[in-house]
Amino acid sequence: MTAVCAMDFNAYATTLKSMGFQEREDMAQYDAVHPPLRRDERTGRFEEPPPQFRRLPGYFFSRGDFIVTIHEQREAKTPDEKLRHICVKFIGIWQQ
């Protein structure tokens, strides 16, 4: 990821905002994760825990009729500083 991580997500987001693009949280996509059934210790019955929602990779920015999407990826799983560093994996631009 070293060559790809030269493209820093935060730098792109900051530059887009300085160019008048607005981050579009309303376009974010989420996925529901359904945890496994668990047994209630009091009743012995299995219960389905509520789904947990997680945001899918991808941030959206718009200016006028242009949309920019940036998909990010962590630089590495270890060490911690690389885990927290967000790299650009994919950039898409389209016009509405």
Image (spheres, rainbow, N blue to C red):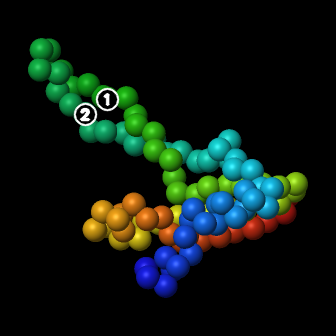
The image shows residue 58 at horizontal and vertical percentages of: 58, 57
Instruction: Please give the residue where the numbered disc 2 appears in the rendered image.
Output: 37
Give me the residue at 65% from left, 70% from top.
91
- What is the crowding at mark 1: few (fewer than 14 residues within 10 Å), some, or many (at least 20)? few
Q: Please name the amino acid that badge 2 sits on.
A: Leu
Eye-nearest disc, 1 or 2: 1
Badge 2 element: loop
> Mark 1 near mark 2, Cβ–Cβ under 8 Å?
yes
The image shows residue 53 at horizontal and vertical percentages of: 45, 39
Q: Quadrant of the C terminus?
A: bottom right
Q: Above or below — where is 30 with respect to 5?
A: above
Give me the residue at 79% from left, 65% from top.
94
Quarter holding residue 64:
bottom right
> Could you tell which of marks 1 and 2 lies nearer the N-terminus?
2
Q: Please name the amino acid that badge 1 sits on.
A: Pro
Q: Which mark is residue 49?
A: 1
The image shows residue 63 at horizontal and vertical percentages of: 83, 55
Q: Which mark is residue 69?
A: none
